[in-house]
Amino acid sequence: MTFLSLQRNKPVINGKYIKNLGYRPGPLYRLALNALWRSRLDGQIKTLEEETAFLKQYFELHKNVPASDVRRPASEKEVSGA
């Protein structure tokens, strides 16, 4: 995966966009955006409409998860060195 490939597939949506959709800011934003980016890299999502639908579904599936239970997956910890 090249830097150019990553930049070309960067989601249009950001935290401000998510907030404007009506979702409260929190740790789930990062996880949702990371999942969105992976889906773009996999070619599953190509348009802003698809990004929006993906995030709405993601937040619906995770709406009952307390913020204290939101943790980075092990794969992200390994990559970031945390």
Image (tube, rainbow, N blue to C red):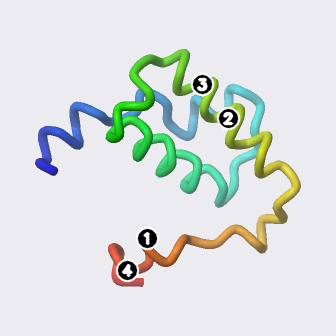
- Considering the numbered disc 1 on the image, is that residue within a helix, a strand or a loop? helix
- Considering the numbered disc 2 on the image, is that residue within a helix, a strand or a loop? helix
- Residue beneath the point at 22% across and 31% down: 8
Of badges 3 and 2, the one in the foreground is: 3
Q: CA distance from mark 4 to mark 2?
A: 29 Å
To which residue does mark 2 refer? 19
Mark closest to the chain's N terminus, 3 or 2? 2
Mark closest to the chain's N terminus, 2 or 1? 2
Percent coordinates x, y for residue 44 in the rendering: 43, 31
Kind of residue at disc 4: Glu
To which residue does mark 1 refer? 76
Percent coordinates x, y for residue 73 in the rendering: 54, 71
Decide: is 7 above or below 20: below
Mark closest to the chain's N terminus, 1 or 3? 3
Percent coordinates x, y for residue 60 in the rendering: 79, 40
To which residue does mark 4 refer? 78
Decide: is 28 above or below 16: below
Mark closest to the chain's N terminus, 4 or 2? 2
Q: Residue furthest bottom?
A: 82
Percent coordinates x, y for residue 31 in the rendering: 57, 56
Q: CA distance from mark 4 to mark 3?
A: 28 Å
Badge 2: residue crowd in 10 Å (few <14, some 14–19, many ≥20) = few
Quadrant containing the C terminus is bottom left
- Residue beneath the point at 38% across and 35% down: 40
Asked which quadrant contains residue 4, the reply is: top left
To which residue does mark 3 refer? 52
Kind of residue at disc 3: Thr
Contact between marks 2 and 1 (CB within 8 A): the answer is: no
Contact between marks 1 and 3 (CB within 8 A): the answer is: no
- Residue beneath the point at 68% across and 42% down: 58
